[in-house]
Image (cartoon, grey):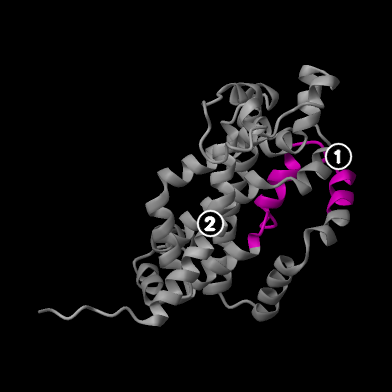
Amino acid sequence: MKKKRKIPVSKIFVYFILAGIGFVYLYPVLYMIVNSFLSAGDLTDPSVTWIPTELCFDNFSTAFETLDFFKSFGMSMLMSLIPAVLQTAVTAVVAYGLARFHIPFKKVILVLILITFLLPTQVMLVPRYVLFDTYHLTDTIWAQFLPALFGQGLNSAIFIFVYYSYFVSYPVVLDEAAEIDGAGKWKIFLKVSLPMAKGAIILSMLFSFVFYWNETYLSNTLWGGKIQTLPLKLQSFTLQYEALYGKEAAGSISESVSLAGTLLSILPLLVMYLIFQRQFVESIESTGITGE
C-alpha cells in the first residue's frame, strides 16, 4: 500500500492566503459583472443575490448611449495609445543613454528620476498647469502627448528603470562587436540593444497604455472637459445620464446601469489582456518584476 502524502501545514497556509487574496481581487469584478445584468425587480428582491432571474441587457444599451461609447472609445484610444507608444520609445532611449554612456553625475540623475516618481501628482499639478497654460496647451491633446515625448509621461520613471536594468545586464561586448563591424551608436541601439529588451518593451507598452487609459485626475485639470474619454465619461455618468434622459430620470438611475457602464469602460482593457496575456506574463518574468 502506498502511503498517503501529507500536505505540509505551511503549504496549506500559503494556499489559504492565496485564496484570500484571490477572493479580495475577484469579488468586486464578479459583483460588477453579475449586478450589471440585474433588472430593477431583481435589485429590490432580497432573495436574488448572484443569479439573476433574467438577464437584463437594457442596462448595457442605456449605459452604451449614456457614455456615447464609440466616440468616447475612439478618444480613449487616441489619448492612450499615442502617449503609450511615445513613452515606450523615449524611456528606452533615456535608459540606454544612462546605461551605456559615461555621463557626469549619472547617479544624481538616476536619483532625480526616482524622485519624480515618488512625488505625488498633486505636487506637480500646479507648475505643470501654469507651464501648459503659458504656451496655450491646456484643453488640447498636446497636454498629454508632449510630456510623454520628453520622458515625463505617466510613471515614466518606472519604465526608465526597467529598461536601465535590462541594458546594464547584458554584455557590453555585443555593442563593441557591432561597433567594430562599423555600426554607429543609433544602429547598435536599434539593431542590437533594443531587440534584447523585448520584454521591457512589451511591459512598458502595456502598462503605459493602462495608466493612460485609467488616468482622470490630470485629464480633468488640463483638458477642462473639452476632451472626454471613457473613464471621464464614467466619472460624470449621472450628469451624462441627466443630460440624456432628464433630471427626473437621473434621480432613479439604477446601480445596474452604473455597473454596466463601468464594465463597458474596462472591457477594452480586459480584451487587451486576453489577447496579450502570454506576452504580458513572459515580459514580467523576463524583467524580474516579480522579484524572483
The residue range painted magenta reads: 128-156
- Whole-angstrom CA distance, mark 2 to mark 1, is 30 Å
Dot 2 amino acid type: Ser
Q: Nearer the viewer, residue 15 or 63?
A: 15
Mark 1 = which residue?
A: 136
Dot 1 amino acid type: His
Q: Nearer the viewer, residue 292 or 49?
A: 49
Dot 2 or dot 1: first in sequence order is 1
Callout 1 environment at 10 Å: few (<14), some (14 to 19), or many (20+)? Answer: few
Horizontal and vertical percent for residue 123? Answer: 84, 62
Up-down: is 166 above or below 239? below
Label 2 sits on a secondary structure element that is helix
Residue 194 can be seen in this image: no
Mark 2 = which residue?
A: 204
Q: Quadrant of residue 193?
A: bottom left
Q: Is residue 130 magenta?
A: yes
Q: Nearer the viewer, residue 216 or 34?
A: 34
Left or right: where does residue 21 sit relative to residue 196? right
Task: Give the quadrant of the C terminus.
Answer: bottom left
Horizontal and vertical percent for residue 264? Answer: 59, 34
Disc tally is 2
Task: Give the quadrant of the N terminus.
Answer: bottom left
